[in-house]
Amino acid sequence: METTPGTTTALPRRGTAPDPQRDPEGCVRAERLDHPVVVGAGLAGYATALALAARGCPATVLSPETDPRGGDTTSTARAQGGLAAALGADDSPALHAEDTLAAGAGLTEPAVARRVTAAGPAVVDLLLGLGTRFDRDDAGALQLGLEGAHGRHRIVHADGDSTGAEILRAVAAAADEHPLVTVRTGTRVARLVVEDGVVRGLHAVDSTGSEGLLRLEAPAVVLATGGLGALFAHTTNPVTSWGSGLALGLRAGATVRDLEMVQFHPTALAVGGDPMPLVSEAVRGEGVALVLDDGTPLANPLAARDVVARAVWEAMSAGRGVFLDVPGGPPELRRDFARRFPTVTRSCRQAGLDPSRDRLPVRPAAHYHMGGLAVDERGRTDVPGLWAVGEVASTGLHGANRLASNSLLEAVACAQDLADDLAAVLTDTPGGPAPVPGPAPVAPPGGGRHAGRPRITDVAPPPLPSAPGVSDRALLESAAGLYRDGETLRRAAATLGAGARDDDARLLAALLLTAALDRAESRGAHRRLDHPEAGRARHTLTHLGHLDQSLRSAS
């Protein structure tokens, strides 16, 4: 796509923002870009920026980290399991889609499952082309692993259990080298700029807060901010992944779908730490059993994650310890464990455990959010000017329970569809995207889908997003963990709803509890003790106007 010279501030390829002009009041700096801004520097954000660049459209990626490539500050970097794609001779995208639909427990959209799984082989080829070093067998073919609820070996890995980190390395390096991709680090987004019902940019600050507020105008904003696991006391997510992107979207007027659907991974390493180290599902896929403290096998280790996680939780609630019995597993795996699973081995050794000799203590932890900002097949939310991709988005793929290793696939596959749409919109509308319809979910009971949405004049000056407190995290987990009931949800919503208007973390927690109350059934990862049976399959839809409803219901 062609750009108009002189309409964008010259930006560094990587580093902090330049010092733009202050407005007459001296309190807000202002910049204007003539291309999309992508909020988030995990796989979804980088894949989107690279896909836009491949279509001739420049993109600026914002990260709150000073070096998003270092450490494990994104969920992508911490992803061990792998990427699911139907590559085997005995496999097909249709079989992959069937497994995805079965795991989704009635809420996965069949057309979305077919589209994303069909893209699997091309996604692997794209990542290989960007330099991702997936594991191969002695003959040079890609190694295909097996994980829970998959009917075929279809999981590609990198360095055993370091898949996310390796993919992130490759895409970040590609973004660094691409002349149309700019990565701005140390930039935290506080609020989206909404004017006349259209997202026109965002407000941000530098990571230290010393530069004051920046108003960054752009023709389109793409949220790629990850999930909300760190709202819970026990999580495998980075502590910064508490749903800030969802709060940005909600406060801009966007609809969130299935907010209550949170997947708990059954085998987080129970040795302390926040976030908790993960023991990849691939370990169970290699034949390692889950056992109680007396060695009794616990459950089918390759059942769907919600099934295994509840079995582990029930044993813990009965006072039993639960372990992965690596020493009792296949002898060849025990001997080769450190090479096959270097990330798990490193975490174990830091905790004084030797996987070749010691059983590994595990417990469930919040791991993945199936809900998110409701988007259509192009990544459009229902607020013009705002797109979403990755875990922050609800595409209809994951339903009530994500199939293992589908999330990395979804991030890359949906980034391509989003880039196709956004590049076409910007090409057709040089001044920026015209107001366009997003997905049209059915209105929830009690009001239309735009009811209660604030206009820009209703929004207070943007504070920094607020991270959850320790006691709030514990309360949310106790009420909205693996087992839920109406009275506990109601009491927690009353507590966490206090201050939610000005506290993003409390806003999300209160609305999540309200959505869990609204889903008076048990389905997938959502288990209601007072409603143990499944009801009619439906999506819950949440927007900012539901906060008042939440507080009324709680009281």
Image (tube, rainbow, N blue to C red):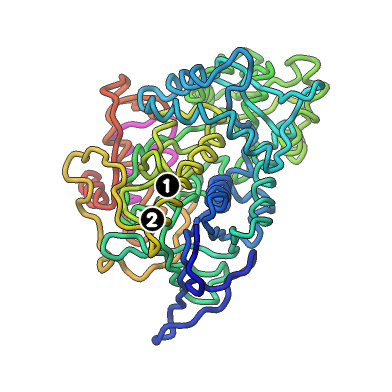
Q: Quadrant of residue 361?
A: top right
Q: Where is residue 401 in the image (x, y as percent from the top left)?
A: 44, 28
Q: Position of residue 145 (x, y in %)?
A: 66, 22
Mark with earlier residue (2, 1): 1
Indicate which disc residue 290 carries.
Answer: none
Residue 240 shows in the view: no
Which residue has dot 1 on it?
Answer: 421
Q: Main secondary structure of the magenta part?
A: helix
Query: On the rendered structure, is 146 left or right of 443?
Result: right
Q: Which of marks 2 and 1 is in front?
A: 2
Please name the amino acid that badge 2 sits on: Asp
Please name the amino acid that badge 1 sits on: Asp
Query: On the rendered structure, is 443 left or right of 334?
Result: left
Observer-nearest of 305 and 476: 305
Q: Where is residue 342 in the image (x, y as percent from the top left)?
A: 76, 34
Observer-nearest of 58 and 465: 58
Q: Quadrant of residue 517?
A: top left
Observer-nearest of 429 and 74: 429
* Helix, strand or loop status at disc 2: helix
* Helix, strand or loop status at disc 1: helix
Indicate which disc residue 428 carries.
Answer: 2
Q: Does the magenta stretch include residue 243?
A: no
Check disc 2: other Cα within 10 Å, few if <14, some if 14-19, many if 20+: few
